[in-house]
Image (tube, rainbow, N blue to C red):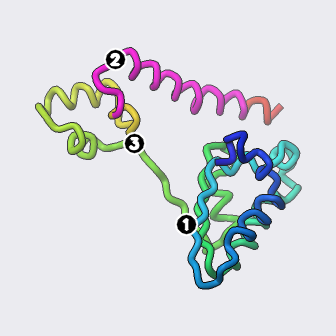
C-alpha cells in the first residue's frame, strides 16, 4: 500500500525493487506481490515529462524476470492507466477492469423484495461498499458524494493543471 505512510520509503522504485527481491529469495517458494496505489512510485517529474521513461516500468519489467514472483499492481491515477500497462508490458501483463455490481449481483447479496431492492439499487448504485452501510441513508449519500469528488472532481482538476 504505497499510499500508506508506513511504506512511504518504498515509493522510490529502486528501494521497492530491493525490498521485493530481498523478500522473495527462496527459489522453491512462489511469491505473490500486491502493489496497491502504485502511482505513488512515479515521481512528479516523470508525470510532467512524457519524454522521460518512467522508472517504475523498468523495475516492474525486471521483477517479471523472477520466475517465482507474481506481481499484481493497482492504481487509481490517470497517469498509470491500463493503456500504459498494455504498452509497457506488451503481452506480459493483463488488465482487469473492476466495475460496480450489476443488479443481479447486488440482489444476490441483499435478497428480499425485488421491487424494494431495485429502488435502493437505482438510488445508490452498485458500489460494493454501499452494501456494508446498512439502512443509513445519510452515510450512503455521504460516501457516494465523497467518491464522486475523489474520482471525478479531483481527476478533472489534476488533468486541468497538468495541461497548463
Separation of residues labelled 2 and 3 (CA atoms)? 19 Å
Q: Report which quarter residue 115 is drawn in.
A: top left
User: What percent of the width, then of the height, locates residue 86?
Assistant: 63, 64
Question: Which residue has dot 2 on it?
Answer: 137
Residue drawn at point x = 79 percent, y = 35 percent: 162
- Sequence-wise first label, 2 or 3: 3
Residue drawn at point x = 61 percent, y = 74 percent: 91
Separation of residues labelled 1 and 3 (CA atoms)? 20 Å
Report how many numbered discs are placed on residues in the image.
3
Question: Which residue has dot 1 on it?
Answer: 94
Q: Report which quarter residue 18 is drawn in.
A: bottom right
Characterize the local packing of mark 3: few (<14), some (14-19) or many (20 or more) Cα atoms within 10 angstroms. few
For residue 56, above or below residue 30: above
Residue drawn at point x = 61 percent, y = 26 percent: 153
Q: Secondary structure at mark 1?
A: loop
User: What percent of the width, then of the height, locates residue 29?
Assistant: 58, 79
Amino acid at each position: 500500500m504505497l499510499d500508506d505512510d508506513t511504506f512511504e520509503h518504498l515509493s522510490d522504485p529502486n528501494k521497492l525493487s530491493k525490498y521485493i527481491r530481498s523478500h522473495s529469495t527462496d527459489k522453491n517458494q512462489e511469491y505473490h506481490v500486491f502493489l496497491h496505489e502504485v502511482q505513488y512510485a512515479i515521481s512528479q517529474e516523470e508525470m510532467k515529462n512524457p519524454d522521460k521513461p518512467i522508472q517504475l516500468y523498468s523495475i516492474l519489467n525486471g521483477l517479471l524476470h523472477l520466475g517465482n514472483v507474481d506481481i499484481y499492481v493497482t492504481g487509481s491515477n490517470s497517469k498509470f492507466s491500463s493503456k500504459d500497462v498494455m504498452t509497457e508490458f506488451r503481452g506480459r501483463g493483463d488488465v482487469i477492469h473492476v466495475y460496480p455490481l450489476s443488479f443481479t449481483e447486488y440482489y444476490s447479496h441483499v435478497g428480499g423484495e425485488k421491487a424494494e431492492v431495485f429502488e435502493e439499487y437505482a438510488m445508490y448504485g452498485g458500489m460494493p461498499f454501499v452494501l456494508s452501510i446498512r439502512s443509513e441513508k445519510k452515510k450512503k449519500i455521504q460516501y457516494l458524494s465523497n467518491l464522486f469528488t475523489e474520482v471525478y472532481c479531483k481527476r478533472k482538476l489534476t488533468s486541468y493543471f497538468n495541461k497548463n
